[in-house]
Amino acid sequence: MGLTITEKILSRALVSGNLVKGSRIGIKADQTLTHDLNGIMSYLVLEAIGLDSKKVELAVQYIDHNMIQADHKNADDHNFILDMTSKLGIITARSGSGICHALHLEHFAAPGKVLIGGDSHTVAAGGIGSFAVGVGGFDNAMAIAGQPFYFTMPKIVRVNLTGRLQPFVSAKNIILELLRIVGVKGGVGKIFEYGGDGVKTLSISERSTIANMGAETGATTSVFPSDENTRLWLKAFDREKDYIPLDADPDAEYDDVIEIHLDELEPLIALPSQPDNVVKVKEVEGVKLDQVMIGSCTNASLQDILSVANILDGEIVSKDVELGVYPSTKTVLRESFRRGALDKLLEAGARIFEPICGGCNGCGFAPPTDGVSLRTTPRNFKGRSGTKTDKVYLCAPETAAASAITGVITDPRRLNKKPLDFKIPDKFIIDKSIFIIPEKDPKKKVRKGPNIKPIPEFAEMEDVTRGKVILKLGNDVTTDLICPAGALYLPIRSNIPEMSKHSFKLVDETFYERAKAFGKSIIVAGHNYGQGSSREQAAIIPRYLGITVIMAKSFARLHLANLVNWGILPLIFTNDEDYNSVDRDDLLSVETMNLKAGEPVKVVNLSKGKTMYLSTPLFQEDLDAIKKGGFVNVLKDKFKNKGEN
Ligand code: F3S
């Protein structure tokens, strides 16, 4: 039997287990990617275990998320990162050089390589044929320390792309279509592997847009073949040596196949406030807008910016709309400038920002109260923009540009513009100022600002966990709801005691005070708990506030791993009746004495006199780690005992 692309890459990287679907496997990373927000936690972990140099072939650090230097906090974080990366031998992009995934795609991502990155959109590198997985800061730290990354071998689903996209229907519409088909939980436990004759019509940045937003389906990752377009991309960045051809064997077997006919796609849009709320743009045309944002790691490539400039050329943005543009990297910014695209954007009335995440994670460009914002970003979760009452729609750059002109949601085909004829340049500008290469004799003293607090110490799990239900939540609780994004909160992410005061604020203003008063408590939730961003503070903070058990109908993959790392036991309801029977403030007792993989866990609702049995979605290694207070404690012991660095 032939092999899929995934199987070809993983059989080389495998260090533990067998490539059997549903089993626990460990793989060795070739590359790691870290950004400033999760990076602080990663380096605090590496500091705690005493690592003195990176143990992975290539480690790259980016500074793109937390960029509003309103006081010393962000700047202190950046200094800490610079000193730690210098000490550990990690290449660092200067702050503001570009969004991590876009910069990595330009300069380091390569077909056939395994990339472990401390951000859920690390999967964007699947566009170039990397096997790229997003993880939390702890798993990212472990990959930097040369430890295997363990996960459940997913099913592999082929997404067959046939035909060619029509003018003004760009790649974002392909992933919106996939989200429409499978939904935000439809990729859980799966890898999407792309193929079909439509693939060759897509550039690497277009493929990366699709792979990037595969994260929104809950998939472990997405991967594209490596072909002539891949070679041309690498050549344009002076990296042709990184090229290898890579494709599935013709007789490779998949667990499922999804067909998408590119010719039939129309401009699509995700309605507030979930990325799978997808309809055709023409169904919601005329919705009045307050702002339009073009940017993010999903959709701010050179091709995207030129396409937007092509539509805005000679036009003026509606007086009722504010248009903000964040090019994805400094190279995109400079290439756009050289081609006159920035001038067209400025002439039309756009605000041009530096190449960072910016408005995508609420770090600038927040909409007004109740504001309607149309964005090319991958996520539209409530409040992520920085405004609690936002109404964020997601679309392709062409729809965003057309709508900025008219002031209302508009199908870009209506404007009768000539489509952009884009070919990637033979050579992109090679910008030697972007990366700081670690010195041979690095600085020994690490600057650590007063806002950077040590990672909390967590005790072993008790044999019986008793606590009140502090929150009873519904489906799709995002990490943005647990630990808010936005300019007010990002600067305190490296200070767990301070940040914990704001957790769950968007769902319950009283959460922090009650958690402190309860001492120990339990969270109950519906499906897909922990959806979205990789931020592990969404696990550390509840643990810090005394929550050691979370009971849900299901968990998002990345957050589940974060819970295990930081010592929270995730339990799954086996029926709706049990979920329905639990109310806020019920006192529960959970038997955590003898946790065994595949065996039910007894939970007694002492307030209602009802006994339930919940399951654990974990392997024995995970349960053993939780008993010890999380993998963070296991690894601390391992490095302390063996001096393993
Ligand atoms: Fe940054 Fe938004 Fe991407 S926060 S990494 S641009 S999803």
Image: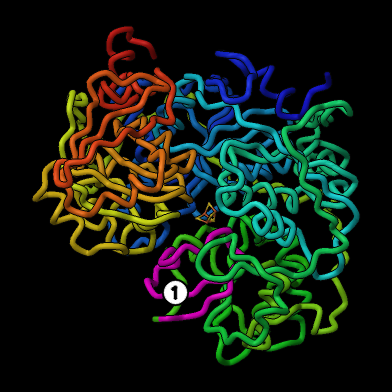
Q: Splitting the image into 4 quarters, where does residue 242 fall?
A: top right
Snapshot quadrant of residue 226: top right
Q: How many marks?
A: 1
Q: Residues within 10 Å of mark 1 (few under 14, many from 20)?
A: many
Query: Residue sitting at 67 percent across and 41 percent down?
Result: 222
- Residue at (40% x, 18% y) in the render: 620
| Colour option used | rainbow
Q: Depth check: give the residue in front, 341 or 10.
A: 10
Instruction: Say if residue 175 shows up in the picture.
Output: yes
The image shows residue 340 at horizontal and vertical percentages of 75, 72
- Viewed as shown, does residue 267 lie left or right of 54? right
Question: Residue 379 magenta-drawn?
Answer: yes
Q: Foreground residue, 165 or 294?
A: 165
Q: Which residue is mark 1?
A: 390
Query: What stretch of residues is rendered in magenta?
Result: 370-394
- Rendering coords of residue 593 (x, y %): 22, 21
Position of 443 compared to 175: left or right? left
Vertical order, 343 against 240 (above or below): below
The answer, for residue 635, to whether it is visible in the render is no
Task: Judge left or right: residue 598 versus residue 50.
Answer: right
| Quarter of the rendering occupied by the N terminus | top right
Q: Give the residue drawn at x 86%, y 69%.
A: 167
| Residue farthest toward the left in the current orientation of the protein | 517
Name the element at disc 1: loop
What amino acid type is highlighted by mark number 1? Answer: Asp
Residue 263 part of the magenta-drawn span: no
Q: Quadrant of the C terminus?
A: top left
Measuring 67% from the left and 83% from the top, which residue is drawn there? 285
Measured as percent of width and height from the top left, residue 504 is found at: 29, 57
Residue 253 position (above or below residue 323):
above
* Main SS, magenta residues: loop
Q: Give the x, y percent position of residue 477.
A: 40, 54
